[in-house]
Image (cartoon, grey):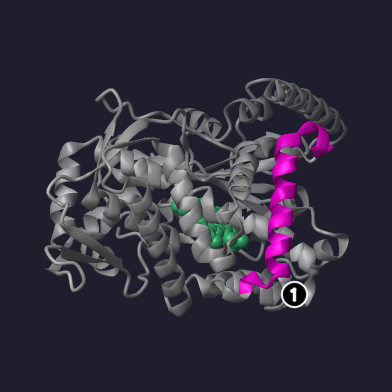
């Protein structure tokens, strides 16, 4: 019932938005300069592209690009222009111009609509937003603090080790050798990722230990579209609104008891910057955006990786063989007749390219983000294309990831070994790094990429070595992916019910998973 009314409200709002846009369009038509990227004709008078985008989301770019295979093109939408970039060379050119083609305005928009900062906090965030006046200001300093905390080094080592420890505990308690357990796989993975990630980020006072916080973050994620409209959210998006209020309270209490003092360097670093500029109430509100970033892409990526392995017996066997080579066995010092099997995840990341490549291939196939940049000044891109101030640049990952001229004939196939570096590969056949956009790029490149990948690889290694996972009913029906407004990775359309059983022959094993240091993988192994 609530869903129906929320959908109805959204439909009315969408129509009102379209009608408003049409009106504005009549008032202000923008001329197209011949130096701008080629203009794609509207399929329906005035608002065809807008309707296409509303109906198809990021799949619309694939439809247009199939009909107009251009390196860059323009879609006119009311009052603005979208420049859609499809070639790796032009993607690299966009990222080189980050002073005039910038991601930063989106950070401000996101904050205003989603975390509802006070007027003072909004002003603080707006100041020197793009770093034009130097390396100071709430946004610029927070950006550096996050990249610093999540680059390989002590901060990331500590965060990743806590994550590993939590993963181990969660898997153990859920599947202890009491026979098979049944789970909805995506829900199960989402729960494990939520707790392991937030334990690592927030430390012993992790507010997500309260199951209501876990519910709240995923309700906010699921209903994000309604919140993003930000029109009387108490009425039009009440579920998401209530979830968001719960998250605000949870984080306010966390900072009030100084929980961050025992949290990760990521959270401490952000707090140290934010407290110079905004109130503790606002720090709690800003934290909602970080918890979204921490979770919403890792969970589906882990799901696709795990289903791709377990639904392919040859791949599962091959990974088990490769991972076993990294396991060292020794008699248990505490329990007679038991053997300790030790696996260092650092060694796996450094020495098992198949597993690292597999996660990248999952990201290649399942990425759905269309990284957005705002044109702040007229810019001549690559000395060729004029991009007009006030327009939007979009880089649809799926388009680049599915381009046969970049990835070769096998572009449509899922090839786990695709990203393994091939010695002696000719320079001309090498894939440019800017063609892989799972984590975005340039100054907006995702700071969480090393942590997220380590988490997915750790979860996969633990599962593959310890457990059999089988679909209830015996046959794997890997669901299709569906895009979602906030995630960069497709979510499964349906869940898969599975049984999880401890592998036979490992009853006398005590497992020990460690991570000696964090590794800067995966930069694409291309
Ligand atoms: C598989 C997991 C993840 C994927 C696929 C992913 C993907 C992305 C993408 C596509 C972007 C936009 C980049 C651009 O526009 O060029 C981004 C940005 C960002 N990501 Fe991630 N991400 C993941 C995990 C994480 C984690 C664990 C964190 C932890 C903090 C995180 C924090 C961020 C932040 C803060 C930004 C904005 C960067 C900025 O403001 O410059 N992400 N991510």
Between 463 and 149, the one lying in front of the other is 463
Q: Is 216 rendered above or below residue 64?
A: below
Q: Which residue is mark 1?
A: 275
251 magenta-colored: yes
Between 211 and 196, the one lying in front of the other is 211
> Disc 1 on helix, strand or loop?
helix
258 magenta-colored: yes
Q: Residue at x 65, y 59 (%)?
A: 102
Based on the displayed image, in which of its 4 quarters is residue 380 positioned?
bottom right
Residue range (magenta): 231-260
Q: Residue at x 44, y 74 (%)?
A: 158
Based on the displayed image, in which of its 4 quarters is residue 404 positioned?
top left
Specify whether 143 is left or right of 71.
right
Q: Does the image show residue 382?
A: no
Q: Residue at x 35, y 70 (%)?
A: 519
Q: Magenta stretch mostly in which secondary structure?
A: helix
Between 46 and 498, the one lying in front of the other is 498
Q: Is 431 rendered above or below residue 492?
A: below
Q: Position of residue 420 (x, y in %)?
A: 23, 56
Based on the displayed image, in which of its 4 quarters is residue 140 positioned?
bottom right
Q: Is 343 rendered above or below residue 218?
A: below
Q: Residue at x 33, y 58 (%)?
A: 458
Q: Position of residue 128 (x, y in %)?
A: 75, 70
Specify whether 155 is left or right of 311.
right
Q: Position of residue 30 (x, y in %)?
A: 77, 39
Q: Residues within 10 Å of mark 1 (few under 14, many from 20)?
A: few
**Quadrant including the N terminus:** top right
Q: Position of residue 369 (x, y in %)?
A: 52, 44
Specify whether 190 is left or right of 4.
left
**Quadrant including the C terminus:** bottom left
Q: Is 215 rendered above or below residue 16?
A: below
């Amino acid at each position: 019932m609530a869903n129906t009314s929320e959908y109805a409200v959204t439909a009315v709002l969408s129509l009102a938005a379209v009608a408003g846009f049409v009106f504005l369009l009549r008032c202000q038509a923008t001329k197209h300069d011949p130096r701008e990227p080629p203009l794609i004709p509207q399929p329906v008078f005035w608002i065809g592209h807008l309707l296409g985008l509303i109906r198809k989301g990021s799949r619309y770019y694939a439809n247009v690009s199939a009909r107009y295979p251009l390196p860059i093109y323009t879609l006119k939408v009311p009052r603005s222009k979208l420049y859609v970039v499809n070639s790796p060379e032009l993607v690299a050119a966009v990222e080189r111009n980050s002073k005039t083609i910038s991601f930063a305005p989106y950070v401000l928009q996101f904050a205003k609509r989603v975390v509802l900062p006070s007027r003072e906090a909004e002003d603080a965030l707006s100041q020197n937003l793009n770093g034009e006046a130097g390396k100071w200001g709430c946004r610029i300093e927070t950006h550096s603090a996050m990249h610093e905390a999540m680059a390989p080094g002590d901060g990331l080592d500590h965060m990743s080790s806590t994550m590993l420890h939590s993963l181990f505990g969660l898997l153990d308690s859920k599947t202890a050798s009491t026979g098979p357990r049944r789970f909805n796989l995506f829900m199960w993975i989402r729960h494990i990722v939520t707790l392991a990630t937030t334990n690592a980020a927030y430390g012993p006072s992790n507010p997500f230990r309260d199951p209501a916080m876990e519910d709240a973050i995923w309700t906010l994620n699921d209903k994000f579209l309604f919140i993003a409209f930000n029109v009387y959210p108490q009425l039009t998006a009440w579920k998401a609104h209530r979830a968001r209020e719960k998250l605000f309270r949870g984080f306010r209490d966390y900072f009030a008891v100084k929980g961050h003092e025992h949290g990760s360097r990521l959270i401490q670093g952000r707090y140290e910057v934010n407290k110079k500029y905004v109130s503790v109430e606002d720090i709690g509100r800003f934290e909602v955006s970080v918890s979204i970033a921490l979770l919403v892409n890792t969970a589906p990526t882990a799901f696709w990786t795990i289903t791709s392995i377990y639904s392919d017996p040859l791949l599962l066997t091959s990974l088990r063989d490769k991972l076993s080579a990294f396991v060292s066995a020794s008699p248990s010092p505490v329990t007679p007749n038991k053997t300790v099997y030790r696996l260092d995840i650092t060694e796996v990341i450094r020495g098992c390219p198949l597993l690292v490549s597999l996660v990248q291939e999952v990201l290649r196939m399942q990425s759905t983000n269309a990284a957005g940049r705002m044109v702040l000044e007229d810019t001549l891109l690559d000395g060729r294309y004029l991009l007009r101030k006030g327009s939007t640049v979009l880089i649809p990952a799926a388009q680049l990831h599915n381009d046969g001229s970049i990835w070769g004939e096998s572009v449509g196939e899922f090839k786990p070994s695709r990203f393994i570096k091939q010695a002696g590969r000719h320079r001309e056949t090498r894939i440019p790094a800017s063609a892989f956009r799972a984590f975005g790029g340039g100054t907006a490149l995702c700071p969480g990429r090393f942590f997220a990948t380590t988490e997915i690889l750790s979860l996969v290694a633990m599962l593959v070595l310890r457990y059999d996972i089988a679909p209830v009913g015996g046959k794997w029906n890997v669901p299709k992916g569906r895009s979602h407004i906030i995630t960069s990775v497709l979510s499964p359309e349906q869940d898969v019910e599975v049984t999880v059983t401890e592998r036979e022959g490992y009853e006398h094993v005590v497992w020990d998973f460690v991570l000696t240091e964090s590794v800067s993988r995966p930069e694409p192994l291309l």
